[in-house]
Image (cartoon, helix red, strand yellow):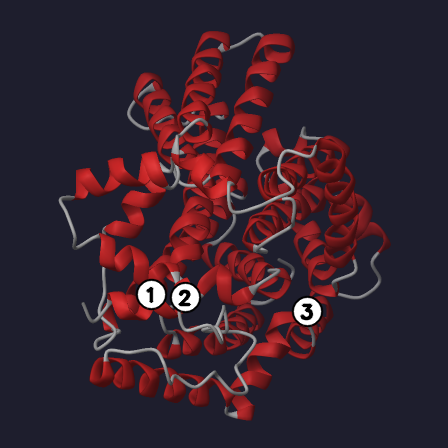
Amino acid sequence: MKLTDNQKQIVLAVLLVLLVPFLYLFGFVHPIADDLGFAYQSQQAPLWEVLVNLYFKSNGLYTGNLIMLLFPFSLSDLLYYRMFLLGAFLLFSLSIFFVINVVFPTLKLIDKTIVSLLFLLTVLSSTTQLSEAFYWQTSVAYYQFSLTLVMLYLGFLVQYFQRKFILNKLVHQLILILMLVFIIGIKESIALIMGFVAALLFYYSYFKTKEDKIFFLVQFIIALIGISVVAFAPGNDYRMENYSNTKNFSHSLLYTVMQMGRFTLKWVVALSGILFVFIVAELHQKATPILKKLDWKIASIIFLGILFLCIFPAYWATGILGQHRTLNLASVFFVLFLLVLAINQGAYFTKHLSFNPTKRIAFFCLVFLLAGNGGMVISDILSGSVKSYDKQLTERAELIQQTQSTANLPLLVNSPKSLFVVDIQADTTHWINQSYLLEVK
């Protein structure tokens, strides 16, 4: 970066300060709904029996369910719950640094750290549903953790094409395959995305480079097997029975296209993403050559394919968009696309931008503070709704422990948008209400 060492240190400090409010929120998170159900199931039988039961009666997520069951907690002691979420966030942040380190191998450490923080802050700013992305164990285990592994996989993949192997080529191939198998078992949407990536890699090796065709064919076949294990699990039918308009192709396709346009436009007009491109574009000459060859138009088509896979399966299985958790996945891939765009079109951007890097970063920080999730988090903290949320849920847990009933639980008042996932329902027999009772049995 065309900044002095002192300027870089100031920029680094400012970016870390912008991250502080998001880290602060981890001290106020509380479990709800699925969190409580999995915590209860993890204590009812040996781990293997619970996993088999989930496969036949809930879903086929062989590694995703394992992650959820390995981290039980208690409503009376939330330290482990909060440490899990904070640890997952830090791992995600480190995976971003790993990718940036692979993409810009010759940059100084401080430059890599700054770019990594800009990447992370762009993700935080554009994430569709912040609470479900980082502050709810169920979503973190199934979605954020899968993204962490995807980032590592992509980093190892770039190293593979660079012929920078871990020990040797065979070991590197084995690591990529094992990671692929593990990632596919975490969540259906990420399984389809990795299958799509495996198909693209096979096509690229077979028709373009004519190299490593056997390896990428094997990887593609393994991806198909893993996806089949997840997709054809008997438990999937149980879930789909709860929805009426399932497997409606025309409805699913129409609404998927509409949602693709909606969220793509939302991310494109977000200034943080645009500014991220303008800042990183200056470093395009430092990027690894393999990414310089990836045309941004091809990258945009790949992103749209991933976005389709984040939306269509939900409509197909339920008839509705449902949760925004899958869009949280897409928002990260969108920032990855922006990274490719910045590298591919870096010369053009740097030639036509009249304001210097210091102003670009300052503008990025200002936009981050005033708009998107950055502004929302600060507003939630300053308004006192975060502490109020913590107080209300703490009192609710104590009341449940005392009465062993959910009959007279008050609804949350003035919940912070940055932390709120879902609340109990007016119907005391609703499964969300009843999930609290699982913790006192």
Query: Of the residues shown, which amino acid type is indicated by label 1?
Result: Ser
Q: Quadrant of the N terminus?
A: bottom right
Q: CA distance from mark 2 to mark 3?
A: 40 Å
Q: Secondary structure at mark 2?
A: helix
Please name whichever residue, 415 or 105, is drawn nearer the observer in this view of the structure. Answer: 415
Q: Residues within 10 Å of mark 1 (few under 14, many from 20)?
A: many
**Position in image of residue 259 (x %, y %):** 74, 49
Please state which of residues 234 and 39 is positioned toward the viewer in this rendering.
234
Residue that mark 1 sits on: 435
Question: Mark 3 belongs to which amino acid?
Answer: Phe
Tell me if I can see residue 71 in this picture.
no
Residue that numbered label 3 is attached to: 364
Q: Amino acid at mark 2?
A: Ile
Using residue 255 as the reference point, say whether residue 430 is left or right of it.
left
Mark 3: few, some, or many residues within 10 Å (few <14, many ≥20)? many
User: Residue at (86%, 53%) from the top-left corner?
Assistant: 352
The mark lying in front, picked from 3 and 1, is 1
For the residues labelled 3 and 1, say whether their Cβ atoms are less than 8 Å apart. Answer: no
- Splitting the image into 4 quarters, where does residue 36 fall? bottom left
For the residues bearing labels 2 and 1, Cβ distance under 8 angstroms: yes
The picture places residue 166, in percent across and down from the top left corner, at 32, 28
- Kindly tell me whether residue 145 is visible in this rendering: yes
Quadrant location of the C terminus in the rendered image: bottom left
Which label is found at residue 105? none
Residue corresponding to mark 2: 432
